Image: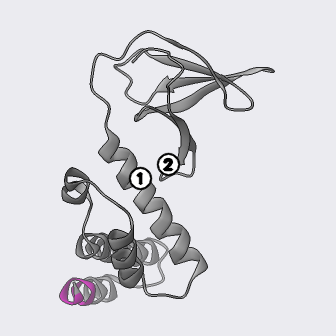
Amino acid sequence: MMTTLSNKISFIISQKGKKLLDINNFIFELNKTTSTKKYYKYEDPSCTVIARTDFEAILLNIKSDCCHPSEPEKIQIQTFKQVVKARAISESTPIPQIYGEEAARIDLSTLSIAALPSQRELSQKKKTLATQHRIDTLYIRYDNGDINANELLDGLSYVVAKY
């Protein structure tokens, strides 16, 4: 990747809510901010490319060249997740419906569609996290003396049976 006038610059939001710089489908994270400039490093630690912008998000320069291809699918998936999350927070529409509507609306490449987690996978992950939380709560209650060993075992067998 070289600095040219045709560099396409945009920003996306990471899963952790951080602003990421997208230059020609290469993703950079904010590394350092000075009084006049922002320095971004490529998200992969093995790559040494650094981009510099001013506070109006105008690209000033890029140091070094990437030795790997860009990943436009990764950006498409991140954008899709961003839209689904924003709609899920602001609307009362069921998440599976939002997921389906956005998947149909957004023009995803075939590779992005293949890499995109299904609604079932997302639901399973949520269910697994909820089950783990219930198990952790049982152990905390046991450690605090709120329940005895038999109640702990009963609670664990109930949680596991529901899973």
Mark 2 vs mark 1: in front: 1
* Residue designated by label 2: 14
**x then y, percent, for residue 104:** 33, 72
The residue pinned by badge 1 equals 78
Q: Earlier in the sequence, mark 2 or mark 1?
A: 2
**Image quadrant where one finds the C terminus:** bottom left
| Amino acid beneath label 2 | Ser
Q: Is residue 91 above or below residue 14?
A: below
Residues at badges 2 and 1 in contact (C-beta under 8 Å)? yes
Camera sees residue 134: no
Magenta residues?
157-162
Q: CA distance from mark 2 to mark 1?
A: 7 Å
Q: Is residue 39 above or below residue 76?
A: above
Judged left or right of residue 85, residue 55 is right
Q: Please state which of residues 3 and 66 is positioned toward the viewer in this rendering.
A: 3
Instruction: Determine if the magenta segment contains residue 160.
Output: yes
Residue 130 quadrant = bottom left
**For the view shown, which residue lies furthest in the top direction?**
64
Dot 1 alpha-carbon crowd within 10 angstroms: few under 14, some 14 to 19, many 20 or more: some
Number of marks in the rendered image: 2
